[in-house]
């Protein structure tokens, strides 16, 4: 079952056309497979929970903060990357500026 990335377990606000499939979810974790096409944007959102991201097809995401500052976040293929939750009220967009799609397994730690 594929879902648009407005899935409650990934974003707390914003909408996007990024493809995400929730693979498992309970009150402690949410695991999903996310595909981000080249030049595709995840709209303004907040990463509510800390997460571990493992790239099946790696690449770099440009994170654009609400104030316009940018940070490139690398997701090397087959490597676990830990990402802290965003602070309350902190919003950002994410863009795959590469020419290849990213395919990620995202494991959110709800507790």
Image: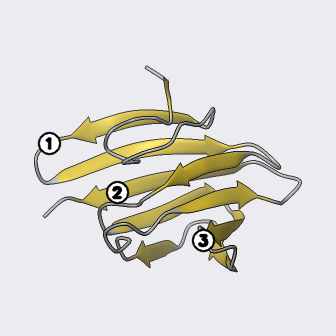
In the shown orientation, is residue 13 left or right of residue 99? left
Q: Label 2's element?
A: strand
Q: Residue at x 72, y 57 (%)?
A: 95
Which residue has dot 3 on it? Answer: 65
Cα gap from disc 2 to disc 3, whole angstroms: 22 Å
* 10 Å crowding of disc 2: few (<14), some (14-19), many (20+): many
The quadrant of the picture occupied by the N terminus is top left
Which residue has dot 2 on it? Answer: 107
| Quarter assignment of residue 94 | bottom right
Of callouts 2 and 1, the N-terminal one: 1
Q: Residue at x 66, y 68 (%)?
A: 64
Query: Could you say where residue 57 lies in the image, as x and y percent from the top left?
Result: 67, 55
Of callouts 3 and 1, the N-terminal one: 1
In the image, farthest residue toward the top: 1
Q: Residue at x 72, y 65 (%)?
A: 59
* 10 Å crowding of disc 3: few (<14), some (14-19), many (20+): some
Query: Could you say where residue 101 lies in the image, as x and y percent from the top left?
Result: 75, 48
In the shown orientation, is residue 3 left or right of residue 111? right
Query: Could you say where residue 70 lies in the image, as x and y percent from the top left?
Result: 70, 77
Query: Could you say where residue 74 lies in the image, as x and y percent from the top left?
Result: 65, 75
Which residue has dot 1 on it? Answer: 26
In the image, farthest residue toward the right: 99
| Quarter assignment of residue 108 | bottom left
State which mark lies toward you, 3 or 1: 3
Cα gap from disc 3 to disc 1, whole angstroms: 29 Å
The reply to whether callout 2 and callout 3 are in contact (CB within 8 Å) is no
Q: Please tell me whether residue 20 is drawn above or below residue 73 in the rendered image.
A: above
State the residue in front, 31 or 42: 42
In the shown orientation, is residue 80 left or right of residue 62? left
The reply to whether callout 3 and callout 1 are in contact (CB within 8 Å) is no
């Amino acid at each position: 079952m594929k879902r648009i990335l407005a899935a409650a377990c990934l974003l707390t606000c914003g909408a996007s056309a990024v493809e995400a499939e929730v693979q498992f979810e309970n009150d402690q974790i949410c695991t999903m497979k996310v595909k981000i096409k080249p030049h595709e944007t995840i709209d303004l959102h907040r990463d509510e929970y800390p997460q571990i991201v493992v790239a099946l097809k790696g690449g770099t995401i440009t994170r654009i903060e609400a104030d316009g500052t940018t940070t490139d976040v690398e997701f090397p293929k087959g490597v676990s990357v830990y990402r802290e939750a965003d602070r309350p009220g902190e919003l950002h967009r994410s863009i795959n500026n590469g020419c290849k799609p990213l395919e990620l397994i995202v494991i959110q730690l709800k507790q």
